[in-house]
């Protein structure tokens, strides 16, 4: 299994190159999309090469989720806590984006190791913003409490018009993912993958991992959820988190893995599909080679055909042949 990185590799590359070549004052204007749902735009001018404008467009939230000012609960506080004076939040953001921040490269720490670590954190802006409400609830779980006004079923966005659900309690948090796929082949592969994923949890080496289950129908935790949110052609995956899963440095990893679980499954589904296509092409190539070997040799067939050929004689040639 391959785990997805929490930071954007492309954004980290842009930031690292900009820090190393800030004196050159090159104009910068880049747009890209990651995970099929997060759109980035970064811009810098020649006049102020040490200032960068980074904008992020988040997935369209479904009706059951709650956004404040176009951002998930606690996103602004999470950005300020994570980056401090290096980042300034602009209000309002650029048109078409949910969040725009100004990066001041002159305020980066002088120590190279600390600077690199902060750049990686900046490149993880998606995790900070999208995982903010999840982080709030899991922090309360670590202290065995429940976040205020979050003692029922909570919906969090993780894909365009799609959400996953949490049932927070003082001693545990249940996380339920409705798994949806547009392609019928992806649905079949994802269903098989998720069933094997649940079975793998029972191995001896994963005893301390969160309990995991898969069901083709909505679990009882989703009682009361909107009907539209209960459609899942690949079933429902449930995780049960306990305080030991979110203590200390485990919190960041848990937030990221939950926030990108659907992308994680989709990645492995596409890899499985590509692997099967490769195996099919190799099989077809081997069958074609076998058929080519079964064909008779062209030169031999040509000679054999010439030895068995005959020439139609005219009546005059036939009489002359009899006389001779």
Image (cartoon, helix red, strand yellow):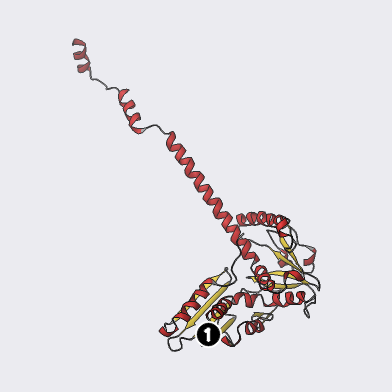
The one of 265 and 63 positioned closer to us in this rendering: 265
Q: Residues within 10 Å of mark 1 (few under 14, many from 20)?
A: few
- Nearer to me, 230 or 311: 230
Count of all numbered marks drawn on residues in the image: 1
Q: Which residue is mark 1?
A: 110
Disc 1 element: loop
Q: Is residue 142 left or right of residue 15?
A: right
**Quadrant where the N terminus is found in the figure:** bottom right
The residue located at (37%, 32%) in the rendering is 297
Q: Position of residue 176 (x, y in %)?
A: 73, 66
Residue 307 placement, left or right of 7? left
In this view of the protein, can residue 162 be seen by the observer? no
Examine the image and state in which quarter residue 38 appears: bottom right
Q: Residue at x 56, y 51 (%)?
A: 276
Q: Is residue 145 above or below residue 239?
A: below
Q: Is residue 192 visible?
A: yes
From the top left corner, tell me how far across and down residue 36 is, in percent: 57, 68
Where is residue 62? Give x, y as percent.
67, 72
Location of the C terminus (image quadrant): top left
Residue 212 at x, y percent in the picture: 74, 61
């Amino acid at each position: 299994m391959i785990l997805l990185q929490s930071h954007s590799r492309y954004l980290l590359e842009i930031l690292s190159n900009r820090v190393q070549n800030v004196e050159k004052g090159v104009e910068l204007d880049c747009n890209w999309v990651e995970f099929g749902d997060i759109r980035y735009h970064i811009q810098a001018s020649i006049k102020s090469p040490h200032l960068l404008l980074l904008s992020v467009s988040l997935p369209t939230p479904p009706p059951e989720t709650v956004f404040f000012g176009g951002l998930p609960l606690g996103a602004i506080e999470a950005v300020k806590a994570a980056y401090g004076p290096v980042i300034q939040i602009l209000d309002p953001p650029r048109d078409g984006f949910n969040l725009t921040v100004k990066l001041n490269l002159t305020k980066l720490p002088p120590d190279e190791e600390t600077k690199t670590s902060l750049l990686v954190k900046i490149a993880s802006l998606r995790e900070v913003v999208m995982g903010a409400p999840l982080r709030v609830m899991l922090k309360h779980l670590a202290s065995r409490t429940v976040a205020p006004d979050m003692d029922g079923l909570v919906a969090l966005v993780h894909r365009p018009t799609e959400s996953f659900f949490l049932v927070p309690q003082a001693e545990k948090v249940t996380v339920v993912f409705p798994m949806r796929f547009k392609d019928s082949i992806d649905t079949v592969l994802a269903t098989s993958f998720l069933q094997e994923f649940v079975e793998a949890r029972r191995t001896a080496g994963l005893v301390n991992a969160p309990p995991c289950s898969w069901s083709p129908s909505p679990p009882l935790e989703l009682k009361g959820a909107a009907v539209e949110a209960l459609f899942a052609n690949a079933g429902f995956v449930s995780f049960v988190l306990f305080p030991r899963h979110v203590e200390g440095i485990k919190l960041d990893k848990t937030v990221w893995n939950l926030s990108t679980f659907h992308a994680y499954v989709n990645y492995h589904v596409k890899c499985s599909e590509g692997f099967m296509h490769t195996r099919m092409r190799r099989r077809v190539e081997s069958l074609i080679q076998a058929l080519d070997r079964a064909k008779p040799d062209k030169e031999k067939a040509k000679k054999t055909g010439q030895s068995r050929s005959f020439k139609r004689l005219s009546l005059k040639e036939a009489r002359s042949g009899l006389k001779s």
